[in-house]
Amino acid sequence: MALTIKRPNGTEDVTPKNIHKWLTVERIVKETASGYGFKEIRIPTFENTELFQRSVGETTDVVQKEMYSVIAKETKFTLRPEGTAGTIRCMMQNGLLNEAMPQKVFYVLSCFRHERPQAGRLREFHQFGVEMAGSALPSADADVISMAYDIINNLGISNVELKINSIGCPHCRAEYHKALKAYFENKKDELCETCLSRLEKNPMRILDCKSPICSDIAKDAPLILDYLCDECSDHFEKLKSYLDNLDIKYTVDPKIVRGLDYYTKTVFEFVTTDIGAQGTVCGGGRYDGLIEQLGGQHTPALGFAMGLERLILTMENQGISFEDNTGCSLYIAPMDETVIPFAMKLAKSLRDEGFWVEYDTVGRGLKAQMKYSDKLGAAFTIVLGDNEVNSKTAKLKNMKTGEQLDIKLDDTFVQNFSNIAISDMFDDVIDNI
Ligand code: HAM
């Protein structure tokens, strides 16, 4: 029996039918990021495992349960579960942090986490993320949040709530950890095994455990906002006033702690109720200690990442249109094989001008060719027979209006095609889903 190999659980294919959705989202996120002065960065798909252990954190779900790691020639590597650690490693290694601050970069990349797949939760997913290094001020937090807010608006997405919180600095967190320990100590018997070990090492991680029993216990745990030191509290108040100044609506949610260990002070999430249980379309925050922790000089930094699959799913569920301006410009229909060389050359000269031009390469009859050109959404067609080739004239048919134009099949046509086409073809064809 033939073996049918399917894609692994929790991964997705993007076929040519759907690529325009990705291209629409990628164009908008990149354009918005450029307006804020962020430049693109590209990093390897895998890194030394230690990078994630030291940044994302040994007691996080991501490191403890979800990483895809391999040992190759005695070195342990991991497929990146997120973009921040690799990006900061790259900025450090390439001397970006010695240049004028702030350094602002963005990335579009795939991430890998061995989670239980469900709608909006994949094992390979894609993030658009940004990182800004070199500013400790709350105005930087406001700038980064404002960019995420603009991206969501520019995509046309509505019904998204911005939730913010502060999880303090190592100074105020020490007190908070004591309070958390005391709280969970009393419920020790009910905690899952992983959380039991977190109790000693990092009790804050119990707050985002996915086990229903642990999350139920965590509901009444002490809140970090009650333990903030003056500096963290002041930072948070200023951030809120800046967001008010920009008319960005937010809710303070003291329960947001994020699932990664590097965060300090500001954390935030953009959440929608339109895509089911996995509604966080964007998550981020400040990580002032990370660069030092990875062996660099103390450099405050912050950023966020958005799940591209979740953004697209939200747009689909909200009935938002995606651009699809990839219609075929011209379909050349040869009536028989003898005119193929002429069709080829004509297609080539128009392609050199940047047009999408097709001619028959599978031997269809004229009727079938017309049907196929319809499928391609061709804006114009030319039927080529011996007469046309000999007289170097033909009829150019506008497929939208049915109009026919007598044309000369020479260089002037190639040059004029831009003028004819621009007036008619380059209205974006919008794919209403
Ligand atoms: P994160 O919250 O783990 O943060 O992920 C960011 C976003 O990636 C989430 O809000 C979600 O949209 C998407 N995402 C996460 N896991 C999955 C999954 N399994 N399937 C589909 N989408 C997913 C980070 O990764 C941080 N590095 C963000 C950051 C950048 N913080 C500072 N700078």
Image (cartoon, rainbow, N blue to C red):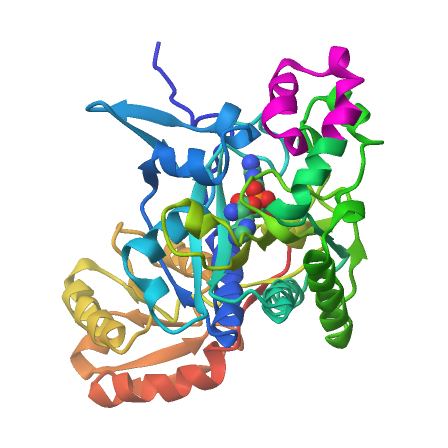
Q: Quadrant of the N terminus?
A: top left
Range drawn in magenta:
180-205
- Residue 151: percent from left, percent from top: 60, 65
Q: Which of the 4 image quarters holds residue 150? A: bottom right
Q: Is residue 309 visible?
A: no
Asked whether 432 or 103 is in front, the reply is 103
Residue at the spot 48% in from the left edge and 59% down from the top edge: 131
Q: Which of the 4 image quarters holds residue 108? A: bottom left
Horizontally, is 229 left or right of 306 in the view? right
The correct choice, above or below, for 138 with respect to 182 in the image is below
Q: Residue furthest right?
A: 220
Q: Is residue 19 visible?
A: yes
Q: Quadrant of the C terminus?
A: bottom right
Residue at the spot 37% in from the left edge and 26% down from the top edge: 69
Asked whether 78 or 359 is in front, the reply is 78
Q: Is residue 78 magenta?
A: no
Asked whether 261 or 245 is in front, the reply is 261
